[in-house]
Structures are given as C-alpha cells and as structure tokens.
C-alpha cells in the first residue's frame, strides 16, 4: 500500500523518505496568505445570513455551560436558528439505569431552543460510544433488540413534534478499524445485533415520530486522503443500501471536524460526493463543524487565518450543493470546545477551533462563515 508524505512522517519514516517536519510545516504555512482579509458586508448574525439563503445555521450547546452562562446563552440566541445538545441526548446522560430515563437536561435545552425560536435536533440514538456504565454488564444478545427498541421509542416519543431531525445512527462506518467489505465499525451494536441494527433503529424512530427527519451521521468525509476517500465510498454504499431496502432515512449528517493543517482538501472530490448523495434524494446537514488547530502555528493571527481559510474553503464547496439544509458548528465559542480535552495543543496554548473566541468575540472564522453564507446559492 502506497503511503503519502504525511503518513510517512507519522510512521517516523522521514529518514527514508527525505521528509522533515519542517517541510510539512512549510506546506501548512504556505497556506497562510496574510493578504486574505475575510472582509464581511454588514454585522448581521449568522442565523440571519443563513436564513436569507434558505438554510439553517446553529451549533451544539451543552447543559453545564448554557445553564450557567448568560452571555453564552445570549450569543446562541443571537447567532443560532438550530440547536443540538452536545451530550444530553446520549445514552450515558439519558439512561442512569437500565430501567430509568432522565430527560431533564435534554428538556432544558429543548425549552431553551424553543424560547429563542431555534429548531432543535436530536443527537444521537445509536452510537458505540457514550454508553452508560451498566450497558456492558446488562445488555446481551437476548435482550439487546428489546433494549434498543425501547430506548428509541421512549426517547423519540418524548420529543415527538419538538425535533427538527434526529441523528438516529452515528458513526456506523469506520474504515480504519473495520475488517468488513462494508466498512462497518466492529462496535457493541454490530456485535450484539449484526448489521440489521441500523435498519431496525431507523424503522423504530420513524414509527415513534413520523414527522422527524431521520439522519445517518458520520465523519471522515472531507479530505482527499486514503481514509476519507474510502469512508466516503462506504457511506455512499450504505446510503444506496438504505434506498434499496426502503430504510426510512431522509438525510446524511456530515460531521466536518476539519483540520486546519490538512493540505489535502480536494473541492472537486467533495463536490462530487455531495452531488452523488443529493442525487439519491437525501438532504445533507453539516452537523459538527469545527477546525482543529493542534498543528498550526501558536501565533494567534496566523492560526485564526488558517482556521478561517479552512472554514471558508470548505463551506464554499458544501453550500454550493442546495441539498445542504443546515450548518451547525460543534460549539460556538472557544470557551467550550471538546478539542480542549480531546485535541490539546502540544504547546498547551488554548485551542481556537470555533467562530467565537473565549471572550465571545467574533473571529476570522466567523467572518469566513458569514462570507460563505452570503455567497451561497439561495435554496
Ligand atoms: O458529565 C460528566 C461529568 O459529570 C464527569 O465529572 C466528567 C468526568 O469525566 O465526565 C462528564 O461527561 C463527559 C461529557 O463529555 C460531558 O463533558 C464524558 O466523560 C465525555 O466522554 C463526553 O465527551 C463528549 C464525547 O462526544 C463523548 O460523548 C464530548 O463532550 C463531545 O463533544 C463529543 O462529541 C462527539 C459527537 O457526539 C459525535 N461526533 C464526534 C464528537 C467529538 O468526539
């Protein structure tokens, strides 16, 4: 299998391939064009710019920060026309015990969304992560189907009529970890129920709330890399399989956790993928957009420019596809981002992946999103 420069470096084969970290860093820096000014017309918030072009714009929010931070609440109300709970509708929050549901935090976020005229989306009904402590010990081949059907039915009915869309199944495909031709992730649900768990999940959700848009959500769909190219091909096959089986899936969720240091962005390949998905009749949501800055220069002006470049280059391609109906970032401000814990910078400098800084001030990433929204074809 051929490996590219980046993989060679990661595999520590630099000595043999004549690659050095400097040459990789040089590539990243060459992307930094200080003359690119990200100028924006007017001061309108993102939610207004998006709705003017016929799509929704919002973010993931979580109970711990939104319930205690009035300034952050005001920012969400100003900028977002759709909200998704970051963690509050996952099993580990909803299910304190096998015979218990706790919707309190999800309900608080649903109320916050409706109070501020935001749509509310659910994330996520079936995932191999964020499973509660009792799961491994209490769920087995005999009871797994009933437990899955009960979870989806109870949760979807609880929010029926209040939800714009549900991420019914999240990250079912994981090319780097799968030994299957279909690329399915060898996780708990596949092990317990076989690949039928996916169709079962969507049919159960559709029965519980026929009005909600049902979404298949996945990541690693963005770049011209061996992993992402294979992931896009496998996801497209899964979407085709839904169509042939009549599985009630109406949209694809593209997480879009971008990497500001990734230079292998191929607009043509991404645009073709979006067109292929739309031609199958699916809508598309960008569900978890952010730009990891782990490998970017520590200098804030340069780092923010490179992050903004990633936002604008990506959204310009994505929003050209009219089947894209919503763009959500995974968090709104650097004050609360999963990257702080999951992708800290080696120099320990605070990460800056989102459109607002930790003082809730607009960054160039905000400008980049506003520019891409303003240029998007009207839906
Ligand atoms: O709430 C508990 C807290 O009571 C406890 O003290 C603390 C101790 O570790 O854990 C807290 O729960 C953490 C939770 O985030 C809330 O902060 C979990 O351990 C931690 O695993 C969880 O991480 C979330 C992760 O998904 C797993 O659910 C991240 O915040 C969240 O941003 C991340 O989001 C995922 C999407 O759902 C799917 N796509 C990828 C994305 C990023 O990984």
Image (cartoon, helix red, strand yellow):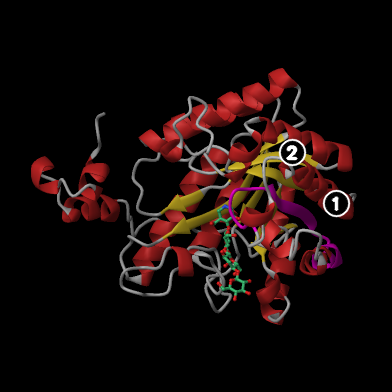
Residue at 63% across, 31% down? 195
Around disc 1, counting alpha carbons within 10 Å, would you say few (fewer than 14), some (14 to 19), or many (20 or more)? Answer: some
Residue 335: image tag: none
Instruction: From the viewer's side, name the closer residue of 154 and 298.
Output: 154
| Residue hosting label 2 | 201
**SS at mark 2 in the image:** helix
Q: Quadrant of residue 248?
A: top right
Instruction: From the viewer's side, name the closer residue of 196 and 215.
Output: 196
Q: Quadrant of ligand 1?
A: bottom right
Q: Quadrant of residue 190?
A: top right
Around disc 2, counting alpha carbons within 10 Å, would you say few (fewer than 14), some (14 to 19), or many (20 or more)? Answer: many
Magenta highlight on residue 326: no
Residue 64 left/right relative to 100: left
Residue 130, image x, y percentages: 61, 58
Quadrant of the rendering where the C terminus is positioned: top right
| Residue hosting label 1 | 154
| Of the image marks 1 and 2, the number of the one nearer the N terminus | 1
Q: Are marks 1 and 2 in contact (CB under 8 Å)?
A: no
Residue 332 left/right relative to 269: right
Quadrant of the rendering where the N terminus is positioned: top left
**SS at mark 1 in the image:** helix
Magenta highlight on residue 121: yes
Residue 9 left/right relative to 157: left
Specify start and end residues of the magenta stretch as a single range: 111-131
Residue 223, image x, y percentages: 42, 39
Above or below 94: residue 349: below
Residue 81, image x, y percentages: 75, 57
Above or below 376: residue 323: above
> Marks 1/2: CA distance?
13 Å
């Amino acid at each position: 299998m051929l490996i590219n420069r980046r993989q060679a470096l990661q595999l520590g084969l630099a000595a043999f391939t004549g690659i050095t970290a400097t040459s990789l860093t040089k590539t990243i820096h060459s992307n930094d064009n200080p003359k690119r000014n990200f100028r924006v017309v007017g001061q309108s918030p993102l939610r207004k710019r998006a709705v003017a072009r016929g799509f929704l714009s919002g973010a993931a929010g979580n109970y711990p920060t939104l319930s205690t931070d009035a300034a952050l609440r005001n920012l969400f109300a100003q900028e977002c026309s759709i909200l998704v709970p970051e963690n509050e509708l996952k099993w580990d929050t909803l299910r304190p015990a096998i015979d218990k549901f706790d919707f309190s935090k999800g309900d608080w976020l649903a109320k916050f969304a409706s109070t501020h005229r935001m749509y509310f989306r659910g994330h996520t009904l079936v995932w191999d992560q964020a499973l509660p402590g009792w799961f491994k010990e209490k769920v087995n081949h005999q009871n797994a189907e009933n437990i899955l059907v009960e979870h989806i039915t109870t949760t979807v009915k609880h929010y029926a009529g209040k939800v714009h869309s549900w991420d019914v199944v999240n990250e079912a495909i994981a090319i780097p970890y799968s030994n299957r031709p279909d690329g399915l992730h060898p996780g708990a649900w596949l092990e317990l129920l076989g690949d039928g768990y996916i169709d079962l999940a969507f049919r159960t959700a559709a029965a519980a709330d026929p009005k909600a848009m049902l979404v298949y959500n996945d990541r690693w769909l963005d770049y011209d890399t061996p992993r992402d190219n294979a992931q896009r091909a496998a996801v497209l096959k899964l979407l085709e399989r839904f169509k042939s089986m009549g599985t009630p899936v109406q949209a694809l969720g593209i997480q879009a956790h971008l990497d500001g240091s990734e230079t292998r962005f191929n607009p043509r390949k991404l645009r073709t993928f979006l067109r292929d998905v739309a031609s199958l009749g699916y809508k598309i949501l960008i569900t978890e957009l952010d730009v990891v800055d782990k490998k970017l220069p520590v200098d804030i002006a340069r780092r923010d420019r490179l992050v903004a470049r990633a936002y604008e280059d990506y959204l310009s391609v994505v929003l050209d596809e009219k089947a894209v109906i919503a763009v959500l970032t995974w968090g709104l401000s650097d004050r609360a981002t999963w990257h702080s814990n999951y992708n800290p910078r080696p120099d320990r400098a605070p990460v800056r992946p989102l459109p607002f800084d930790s003082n809730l001030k607009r960054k160039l990433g905000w400008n980049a999103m506003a520019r891409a929204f303003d240029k998007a074809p009207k839906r």
